[in-house]
Structure formats: structure tokens, C-alpha cells
């Protein structure tokens, strides 16, 4: 029986991050759709198995985007990623419904396992 690949949506305003993360996840057999901004993602809101959100973006932060995603009825698990995280930010992310918060640079195996854990939860 063929299992369809995990579909991941990645929202990050940094093109280099989008390119490297999507290449990494695709190397693990995942299908990745990338979005350069929260507004671009919200305009194309589609079901996915997991959503990766950058915390710090110019239009709205990852928590605001997560709230809007939930308001729109999308229930896929979300993982927030940040370059400047702390315990308060982590606590807020979890309270907002994020499955996990990861700090950049993210170890490849930790990212992949976090996605698989979020999907399985």
C-alpha cells in the first residue's frame, strides 16, 4: 500500500530559509508548498498535514498568523520556528495551539521528527 507523502506548508519571509527547508523536507519524501508571507498563505489557504511558520515576519507574526489560520477553520498542526526564541515565547506558542516551537538553526533530524510527531498527534 502506498502512503501519500506528507504535505507541508512553509511560511517564511526569508527566501534562503524557504529554499533550504523545502529541499531538506523534500529529501525526506515530503511535499512542500512555500509561501513568502502570511498574506500569501492566507490567500491560498489549503489543507495540509503540517504548517511551519516563521515567528518573526513583517506583516504579522507567527502567533497572529496561527490565530488567523484557526479562525479560518484550518486545523493542521503548526510548528513555529524562530531565530530569537525564549521560554515566554515558547509558552505563548503552545498556548496558542502550536504543536512545538523550534529555534533556528533547526537541526534537520529534529525538524523532521517534530513534523512527524505533530502529524501523528
Image (cartoon, grey):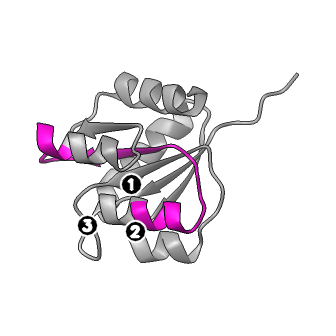
Is 48 placed above or below 86 here?
A: below
**Where residue 65 appears, x then y in whole percent?**
38, 65
Q: Residue at x 45, y 29 (%)?
A: 112
Asked whether residue 104 appears in the rendered view, the answer is no
Magenta segment: does it hold 68? yes
Is 69 placed above or below 84 here?
A: below
Q: Residue at x 57, y 33 (%)?
A: 119
Dots 1, 2 in contact, CB < 8 A: yes
The residue where tag 3 is placed is: 57
Q: Which of the 4 quarters of the picture holds residue 61?
A: bottom left
Q: Which residues are magenta?
A: 67-89
Q: Circle 1 — which element? A: helix
Asked whether residue 121 appears in the rendered view, the answer is yes
Residue placed most toward the observer, 12 or 77: 77
Q: Circle 2 — which element? A: loop
The residue where tag 2 is placed is: 36
Instruction: Report the quarter where the N terminus lies.
Output: top right
Q: Residue at x 51, y 60 (%)?
A: 70
Q: Which mark is residue 18?
A: 1
Amino acid at each position: 500500500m502506498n502512503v501519500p507523502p506528507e504535505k507541508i506548508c512553509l511560511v517564511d519571509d526569508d527566501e534562503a530559509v524557504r529554499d533550504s527547508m523545502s529541499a531538506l523536507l523534500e529529501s525526506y519524501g515530503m511535499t512542500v508548498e512555500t509561501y513568502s508571507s502570511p498574506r500569501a498563505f492566507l490567500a491560498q489557504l489549503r489543507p495540509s498535514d503540517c504548517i511551519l511558520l516563521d515567528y518573526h515576519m513583517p506583516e504579522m507574526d507567527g502567533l497572529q498568523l496561527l490565530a488567523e489560520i484557526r479562525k479560518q477553520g484550518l486545523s493542521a498542526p503548526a510548528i513555529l520556528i524562530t531565530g530569537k526564541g525564549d521560554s515566554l515565547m515558547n509558552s505563548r506558542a503552545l498556548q496558542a495551539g502550536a504543536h512545538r516551537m523550534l529555534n533556528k538553526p533547526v537541526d534537520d533530524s529534529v525538524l523532521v521528527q517534530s513534523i512527524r510527531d505533530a502529524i501523528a498527534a
